[in-house]
Image (cartoon, helix red, strand yellow):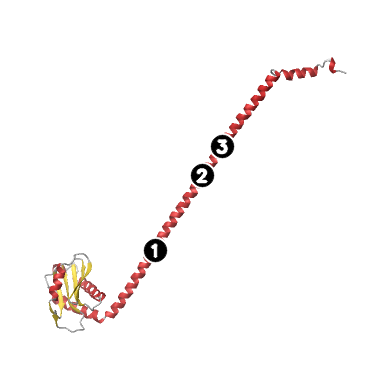
């Protein structure tokens, strides 16, 4: 597929493109890598993301961001995170140099002379600092994991707080309902007491009326009292000794 370069080289070919137009590229190898990479670029989704294609013991790694595509062809033994680190570094440098300016109007491969050697420098840097990059990525992964755990714990705490809030609201509602129930009970008891008092008064009135009726029936009015008084005041001879 290709000739040239040493076996110690990890990266074979790299470019930066606007849309499907390659603005700058670099390789020390001969072969059909640029043609295959160009075919992959034509089929590449336009959304911001990372993509990887495998072909003949090589990987074609792409990073798409804001209409620009960054590509590196690497040997399949190269760890994926190393290729991604190279593309991220390439993107940052390119945007710093050309973002919002020359790159937006540049023609095909017009930036080769300026940016081609820069691509080579980034390749060399990544290869020489692969161990450091791997350590940094591990630390980032650990930080990301810790962050995820913290966010999960925060979500659980918030969920518990919401449940506690719901429980507090329910307790408050129950307390309010209990107070309302007590008030209603007091009203009912008062109403029943008044009703009982009315019944008692009615019964008492009936009893008094019955007593009065019996009295009047037996004594034929109030004469019993008068006659008794009269007898006491004017005793008959039979009552004297």
Q: Quadrant of residue 145?
A: bottom left
Q: Element at badge 2?
A: helix
Provide residue 76's location: percent of width, then percent of height: 21, 77
State the residue position of label 3.
Answer: 192
Distance (Cα) linking label 2 and label 1: 40 Å
Q: Which label sits in the foreground, 3 or 1?
A: 3
> How many callouts does the rendering have?
3
In this rendering, the answer to whether 207 lies above or below 235 is below
Question: Residue reaching furthest top?
Answer: 237
**In the image, is 237 to the left or to the right of 101?**
right
Foreground of the two, 106 or 29: 29
Q: Residue at x 38, y 62 (%)?
A: 155
Task: Classify mark 2: residues with Cα within 10 Å, few (<14), some (14-19) or many (20+).
Answer: few
Q: Residue at x 59, y 32 (%)?
A: 199
**In the image, is 2 to the left or to the right of 180?**
left
Quadrant for the C terminus, please.
Answer: top right
Distance (Cα) linking label 3 and label 1: 56 Å
Q: Quadrant of residue 148?
A: bottom left
Q: Are marks 2 and 1 in contact (CB under 8 Å)?
A: no
Distance (Cα) linking label 3 and label 2: 16 Å
Provide residue 142's location: percent of width, then percent of height: 34, 73
Q: Residue at x 49, y 47 (%)?
A: 176
- Residue 154 is marked as 1
State the residue position of label 2.
Answer: 181
The mark nearer the N terminus, 3 or 2, is: 2
Foreground of the two, 115 or 9: 9
């Amino acid at each position: 597929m290709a000739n040239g370069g040493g076996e110690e080289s990890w990266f074979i070919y790299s470019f930066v493109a606007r849309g499907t137009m390659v603005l700058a590229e670099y390789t020390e190898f001969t072969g059909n890598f640029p043609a295959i990479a160009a075919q992959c670029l034509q089929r590449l989704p336009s959304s911001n993301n990372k993509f990887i294609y495998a072909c003949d013991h090589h990987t074609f790694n792409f990073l798409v961001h804001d209409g620009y595509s960054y590509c590196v062809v690497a040997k399949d033994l190269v760890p994926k995170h190393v290729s991604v680190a190279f593309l991220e570094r390439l993107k940052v440098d390119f945007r710093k140099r050309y973002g919002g300016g020359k790159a937006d109007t540049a023609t095909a491969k017009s930036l080769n002379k300026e940016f081609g050697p820069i691509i080579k420098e980034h390749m060399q840097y990544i290869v020489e600092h692969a161990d450091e990059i791997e350590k940094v990525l591990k630390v980032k992964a650990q930080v990301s994991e810790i962050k995820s755990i913290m966010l999960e714990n925060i979500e659980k705490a918030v969920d518990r707080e919401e449940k506690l809030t719901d429980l507090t609201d329910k307790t408050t509602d129950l307390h309010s309902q209990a107070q309302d129930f007590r008030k209603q009970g007091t009203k009912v008891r008062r109403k029943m007491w008044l009703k009982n008092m009315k019944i008692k008064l009615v019964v008492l009135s009936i009893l008094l009326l019955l007593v009065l009726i019996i009295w009047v029936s037996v004594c034929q009015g109030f004469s019993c009292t008068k006659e008794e008084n009269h007898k006491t005041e004017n005793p008959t001879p039979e009552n004297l000794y």
